[in-house]
Structures are given as structure tokens and as C-alpha cells.
Image (cartoon, helix red, strand yellow):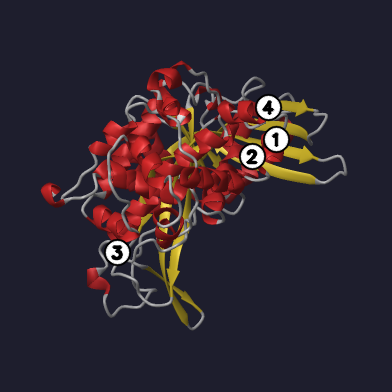
């Protein structure tokens, strides 16, 4: 609670502004309380909506009192999980997306994320992932994929994650990949339907990010799929930069030119020897000319990195960018703009899927409510990371004479301890003091 009050002292007021079309005079539970009830589903890593009943509603003497302190409410009973679902059905996806934006904007203003900037610009990691897979059509908007004789019905999402210090990744925006114009496709095969895809979703997502964060300058870190003229033009229209994975199969002519010119630029080389990490060798070529499929010409800088481990094993990486590449910048571009892109998969998707957050679980069969659950998970994940990577947790561990890993054993155990505390401990009033929380110094730390 000290972390929440420190970073987001107005959070409860923001929750009060969530859209709610319920008949208010007939409501037992406030939107603020139900929003925290929904966040608890993910903060405590319960895994499914039903667990709200088993673990919280019927599972502890202190739950109601603690949640009332948390939400600053005076509810007399606890809801069931269907009450949360009913509330979300009367809210809107846009309302929760605005809440997510408020949290990120607050962290930006506090300069919490500044240490992760690349050449003064924030790094945005872009990637898509699968959410749900059905063997029968789930809704009119499913993506359709033929797999042998079997037809799969899929729901995917394109995510923009803001890179922060200590491996933190915060959702900037989500664009659901779905066949929104699927009505005319009835009776046609999967091969005949022009389905939605990552590149189409990107064209919808980037203007939304520009509208939500008009003053911020971003560097988009993307995989090789996005190494094409339409994406370069879209990023340029936004006034941003990019670092995109460079592969021979995506742009073969440009790749051949890069490999041919590398030996002719011996001065464009940097080597880093590390005691406990593989040796890194960086090379780069400036101002490569590239003509895209629409006849536009681009000047691109290409760089690569070869990592050699102590046992001689090597790994090779390459990227394209329009950022200035030189002795002083190549290492930062390769790391923050290139190598750190994997964090959208590991720290983001994999963590959210393979933990109690349970990203791939069907929290609602209603497509619109399912999207709200997804964004609610992203909001909760912001709070989870600020707790796990915040220095308050390190101080708690130091007071116990052990590092965080030894004190809790795993990140999942932190959620389990928090659950037990919520159920059986009477949380003290002073823990919720916003003035005390405001005086704290909390930094993000991965040690």
C-alpha cells in the first residue's frame, strides 16, 4: 500500500471515474470497490474468477476490512465473482484503457522510468501474442487458421510495452487482432478471407499511442516482420524512431549490401570484454539505401553484435535503425533498442501466461468483457512490478538479513504471502497514510 500510495496517490479517485451504466441507486457495491476486487484477481495471482469466491469471499476474516481500507470504502459484505463480471459488462474498454494511460503518465512525470531511455527517448517494445484458441468458432470476430484437416479459431493481441529500469515492462496500449468486418465472410474459406494481422493492427495502434502520449518521443523496438517501408513511413509520420531486427530473409538485397560493406569499414568497430558476461563485438554501416515496395527511398543504419562466451559459443544479432550509430551510441542501441526487445516476450507475455496471472485463461466468453479483463490484468501487472522491483521490498529483505530471493523463494510466493496477509492480518491504518508514502524514496532495482 505504501507503493500504491507513493506512485498513485489519486488512484481511488481515478477508479471512481470508470464508466458505469448500472442503476446507481440499486447498486450495493461501488465501482471503486469492484475495481479493486478485479485487481485482486491478478495482484494475488488467483488464476480464475471463481477463486475470488474461494480464496477471498469465503477465505479469511480480515478480507472485507482490508479491502475497505484499500478502496477507502465502507462496504458491509463481499461480492461474488459474477458481481465483478456484471460490473465490467456495464463499463467500457475505453475507460480501463484511460486508467492504464493515467498510471503510465504518472510514472513518466515522476521520472521513474528515465533510466531506461535510449538517447533521451523512451523505448517501446512491440510484439503480438496469442490469447485464446478454440476448436469451434467463439465469436464472429475470430481469426481462422487451417492446421491440416483442423480449423482453429484464434484471438491475438498486439502489445506496446514501455521499457523501464530493472526489467520492468508497462503496457502502453493494446490492439486486438480480430476480424471486425467478418460479417460478409460467412460461407467463405479461411484462405479466401482477408484477415486482420499484426501490420494492420500496428496502423491502428500507433496513432492511438500518439494521441495518448503526444509529447513523448519513442524508439520502437520491433522484430523483422516490421522491417518494411509502410512501417518505416508510419513511424516517421509519428515523429518517432525505430530499431528493427535485421534478417536476410526479410530484406535480402539490403542484407547483401550490409555484409559486403562491413569489411570496408574497419574503423566502425567496438569490442567489450566483460568479467562475468560474454565478450561483445559491435560493427556498423551507415547510410544504406533501401527502396521499399512503394518506391520510397530510405537511408538506414545497420549494426550487428557478436557475443562470444567463455566456452567459445557465439550468438549473432543484427538491427536496422535511423538513430545515429557510432562509438558512443552503438552499445546502447544494440542493448536497449535491440537485445531488450525480448523482454516483451519474457517479462511480458511469458510471465503473464505462465503464472497465476493466467493471461490465456478465458475470464469471460463475452468478447468485449474479455478485452476489459485483459486490460485489467495489464493495470494490475504495473502494480505487481512496482512492488517486486521496488526498493521497499529490498529494504524489507535486508531487515530480515536475507536477499529477496532467499526471503520469498520465488515471485509467485510474494503473491501467496500477500494473499495470506489480506485474509488473516489486520492491516494498520498508518500503512495507508498518503503523506508518509509521499515522503518515501522508492527506486526500481533488479538486484
4 or 1: mark nearer the eye: 4
Residue at 50% over, 47% down: 419
Circle 2 sits on which residue? Answer: 258
- Dot 1: within a 10 Å radius of its alpha carbon, few (fewer than 14), some, or many (20 or more) residues? some
- Dot 2: within a 10 Å radius of its alpha carbon, few (fewer than 14), some, or many (20 or more) residues? some
Q: In the picture, which quadrant includes the C terminus? A: top right
Q: Position of residue 300 (x, y in %)?
A: 53, 34
Q: Position of residue 83 (x, y in %)?
A: 28, 57
Q: Which mark identifies residue 398?
A: 4
Q: How much space separates mark 4 and mark 1, taking CA atoms?
A: 50 Å
Q: How many marks?
A: 4
- Give the quadrant of residue 445: top right
Circle 1 sits on which residue? Answer: 262
Numbered disc 1: secondary structure: helix
Q: Are marks 2 and 1 in contact (CB under 8 Å)?
A: yes
- Give the quadrant of residue 325: top right
Q: Which mark identifies residue 366?
A: 3
Q: State which tag comes first along the sequence, 3 or 2.
A: 2
Residue at 24% over, 49% down: 92
Q: State which tag comes first along the sequence, 4 or 2.
A: 2
Q: Position of residue 317 (x, y in %)?
A: 67, 42
Q: State which tag comes first along the sequence, 3 or 1.
A: 1
Left-right relation of 206 to 123:
left
Left-right relation of 435 to 308:
left
Say if residue 245 shows up in the picture: no
4 or 3: mark nearer the eye: 4
Q: State which tag comes first along the sequence, 4 or 3.
A: 3
In the rendered view, would you say 169 is above or below 294?
above
Amino acid at each position: 500500500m505504501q507503493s500504491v500510495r507513493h506512485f498513485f496517490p489519486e488512484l481511488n479517485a481515478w477508479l471512481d471515474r470508470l464508466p458505469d451504466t448500472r442503476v446507481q441507486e440499486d447498486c450495493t457495491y461501488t465501482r471503486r470497490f469492484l475495481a479493486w476486487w478485479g485487481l485482486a484477481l491478478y495482484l494475488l495471482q488467483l488464476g480464475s474468477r471463481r477463486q475470488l469466491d474461494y480464496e477471498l469471499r469465503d477465505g479469511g476474516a480480515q478480507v472485507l476490512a482490508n479491502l475497505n481500507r484499500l478502496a477507502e470504502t465502507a462496504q458491509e459484505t463481499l461480492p461474488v465473482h459474477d458481481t465483478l463480471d456484471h460490473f465490467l459488462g456495464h463499463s467500457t474498454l475505453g475507460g480501463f484503457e484511460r486508467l492504464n494511460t493515467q498510471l503510465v503518465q504518472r510514472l513518466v512525470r515522476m521520472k521513474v522510468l528515465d533510466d531506461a531511455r535510449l538517447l533521451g527517448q523512451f523505448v517501446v517494445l512491440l510484439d503480438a501474442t496469442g490469447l485464446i484458441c478454440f476448436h469451434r468458432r467463439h465469436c464472429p470476430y475470430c481469426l481462422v487458421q487451417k492446421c491440416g484437416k483442423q480449423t482453429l479459431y484464434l484471438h491475438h493481441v498486439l502489445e506496446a510495452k514501455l521499457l523501464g529500469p530493472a526489467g520492468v515492462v508497462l503496457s502502453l496500449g493494446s490492439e486486438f487482432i480480430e476480424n471486425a468486418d467478418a460479417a460478409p465472410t460467412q460461407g467463405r474459406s479461411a484462405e479466401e478471407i482477408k484477415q486482420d494481422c499484426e501490420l494492420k493492427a500496428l496502423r491502428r495502434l500507433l496513432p492511438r499511442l500518439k494521441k495518448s502520449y503526444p509529447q513523448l518521443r519513442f524508439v520502437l523496438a520491433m522484430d523483422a516482420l516490421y522491417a518494411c517501408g509502410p512501417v518505416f513511413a508510419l513511424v516517421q509520420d509519428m515523429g518517432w524512431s525505430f530499431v528493427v531486427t535485421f534478417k536476410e530473409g526479410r530484406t535480402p538485397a539490403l542484407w547483401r549490401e550490409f555484409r559486403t560493406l562491413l569489411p570496408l569499414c574497419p574503423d566502425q568497430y567496438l569490442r567489450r570484454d566483460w568479467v562475468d558476461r560474454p565478450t561483445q563485438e559491435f560493427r556498423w554501416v551507415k547510410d544504406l539505401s533501401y527502396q521499399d515496395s512503394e518506391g520510397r527511398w530510405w537511408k538506414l543504419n545497420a549494426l550487428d553484435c557478436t557475443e562470444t562466451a567463455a566456452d567459445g559459443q557465439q550468438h549473432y544479432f543484427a538491427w536496422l535503425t535511423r538513430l545515429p550509430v557510432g562509438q558512443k551510441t552503438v552499445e546502447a542501441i544494440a542493448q536497449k533498442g535491440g537485445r531488450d526487445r525480448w523482454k516483451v516476450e519474457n517479462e511480458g507475455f511469458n510471465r503473464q501466461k505462465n503464472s497465476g496471472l493466467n493471461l490465456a485463461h478465458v475470464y469471460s466468453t463475452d468478447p468485449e468483457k474479455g478485452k476489459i479483463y485483459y486490460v485489467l490484468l495489464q493495470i494490475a501487472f504495473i502494480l505487481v512490478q512496482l512492488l517486486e522491483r521496488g526498493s521497499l521490498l529490498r529494504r524489507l529483505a535486508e531487515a530480515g538479513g536475507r536477499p529477496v530471493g532467499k526471503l520469498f523463494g520465488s515471485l509467485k510466493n510474494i503473491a501467496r504471502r500477500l494473499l495470506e496477509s489480506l485474509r488473516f492480518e489486520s492491516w494498520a491504518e498508518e500503512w495507508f497514510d498518503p503523506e508518509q508514502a509521499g515522503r518515501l524514496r522508492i527506486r526500481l532495482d533488479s538486484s
